[in-house]
Image: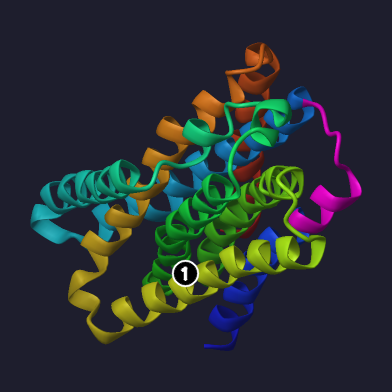
Amino acid sequence: MNEVLLTAIGVGTATVFGAFLGFVFKNISHKFSDVVLSFAAGVMLSASIFGLILPSLEYGGKFGIITTIAGIFAGAVCLNVIDKLVPHLHRLTGTNTESMKSSQANKVLLFVIAIAIHNLPEGIAAGIGFGSGDISQALIIAGGIALQNIPEGMVIIGPMLSVGIKPSRTFLLASITGIIEVVGTLIGYFAVSISTAILPFALSFAGGTMLYIISDEMIPETHAHGSERAATYALLVGFCFMLVMDTIFG
């Protein structure tokens, strides 16, 4: 339980750390941001496949493939529904800082709320990883999600400051999005702890949510500013980095 709690705090703190970097480096180039986010996408892609989907097949028994496929699509559909209600990164960050200045503050706050809502299933995915009992693999999954949270935390600072929200309140709102992820991690952990029977489905559900985030949000965002080639190689580096980590610590 101590590992889960510390991991939950670590995943949430990654967003806060990203927000801090957003204050320090206010003029980070799109290319740098895209490369970092693509690296995180590669890490998450590897973690979702080797840490969630393949274990789901192993724990699923005779009908494991059916359970795993159902879970993947259930996770994707769940985030798709959330996306319809509250659009996320690539729908709102496609505008530049100048256009954001002419936007109302409530639109920016909607953007922050969207990130907070999307952080919940990401946190749940991190918590579910511990349900398999493979602590090292769970930590790798959580690490991948935490890496993705850093550039996300950086992204939300500029728009809030640009519409006149006080720096102290900006940092507080960014921190809340990280706290949501802590809650999600604990929810995911306790859900699979209560009933191990749902573990195969829960693992693939978490994997489906991560695949959805990678395909629907992270890749489009990193390919929207003319850095497609660098972003593609950064994704491959992130994927291979996780392969190495899984080989060493898995």
Residue named by callout 1: 134
Secondary structure beneath label 1: loop
The percent coordinates of residue 172 (x first, y second) are: 70, 69
Residue name at image x 28 percent, y 55 percent: 205
Judged left or right of residue 7, residue 154 is right
Where residue 167 sits, quadrant-wise, is bottom right
Residues packed near mark 1 inside 10 Å, few (<14), some (14 to 19) or many (20 plus): few
The percent coordinates of residue 69 (x first, y second) are: 18, 44
Front-most of residues 159 and 241: 159
Instruction: Give above or below for 235 relative to 68.
Output: above
Residue name at image x 52 percent, y 35 percent: 92
How many marks can you see? 1
The percent coordinates of residue 14 (x first, y second) are: 69, 61
Q: Quadrant of the C terminus?
A: bottom right
Examine the structure image and report whether residue 26 is included in the region drawn in magenta: yes
Magenta span covers which residues?
19-29
Examine the structure image and report whether residue 44 is included in the region drawn in magenta: no
Give the amino acid at mark 1.
Asp
The percent coordinates of residue 61 (x first, y second) are: 15, 60
Residue name at image x 52 percent, y 39 percent: 89
Judged left or right of residue 19, residue 211 is left
Judging from the image, the colouring scheme is rainbow
Residue name at image x 83 percent, y 33 percent: 28
Judged left or right of residue 74, residue 129 is right
Front-most of residues 112 and 138: 112
